[in-house]
Amino acid sequence: MARLSAFLSGLLFGLGLLLAGMANPGKVLAFLDLAGAWDPSLALVMAGAIAVAALPLHLAGKRSRALLGGSIQLPTRRDLDARLIVGSLLFGVGWGIAGICPGPAVAILLTWHWQSALFVAAMLGGMLIFTALEGRRGR
């Protein structure tokens, strides 16, 4: 049941990304172009996502177990450190250059465009580098 729930949640999330235009790099780049032909529609998508997630996230914080019985693992840290800031900046720069973030990148792999495959390969490479660096850091 947990795997089916995860699959259906991922499918719904991917469909939402596609319908919202988040998988269209041109639309994303137009949203980021504040000095040019700015397209504010993705701000509405983000506001809608926050509104939809607010109540379930609040309720999850009051529970000790998930609906399917697993443990709930919500972040507890509230501080900002250099790693978080640098990681956020790298994510933002990558998003601004490519017009794609990780969720939509996986969704648009089905278009078979080489650019999406290159983006996902670079993203996976970055994850591997991070994992290797974290392994060295923990020693």
Image (cartoon, grey):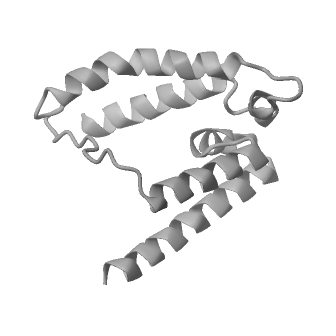
Q: In the orientation shown, which residue stands out farthest toward the left?
A: 64
Q: Position of residue 54 (x, y in %)?
A: 36, 19
**The one of 124 and 47 positioned closer to us in this rendering:** 47
**The one of 64 and 11 positioned closer to us in this rendering:** 64
Quadrant where the N terminus sits is top left
Relative placement, left or right, of 70 versus 42 is left
- Residue 67 appears in the rendering: no
Relative placement, left or right, of 54 versus 21 is left
Quadrant where the C terminus sits is bottom left
Q: Quadrant of residue 136?
A: bottom left
Relative placement, left or right, of 108 versus 3 is right
Q: Position of residue 12 (x, y in %)?
A: 48, 25
- Residue at x-position 61% and y-position 52%: 89
- Residue at x-position 52% and y-position 15%: 48
In the picture shown, does residue 45 fall above or below 127? above
- Residue at x-position 59% and y-position 19%: 45
Q: Quadrant of residue 58?
A: top left
**The one of 85 and 29 positioned closer to us in this rendering:** 85
- Residue at x-position 73% and y-position 49%: 116
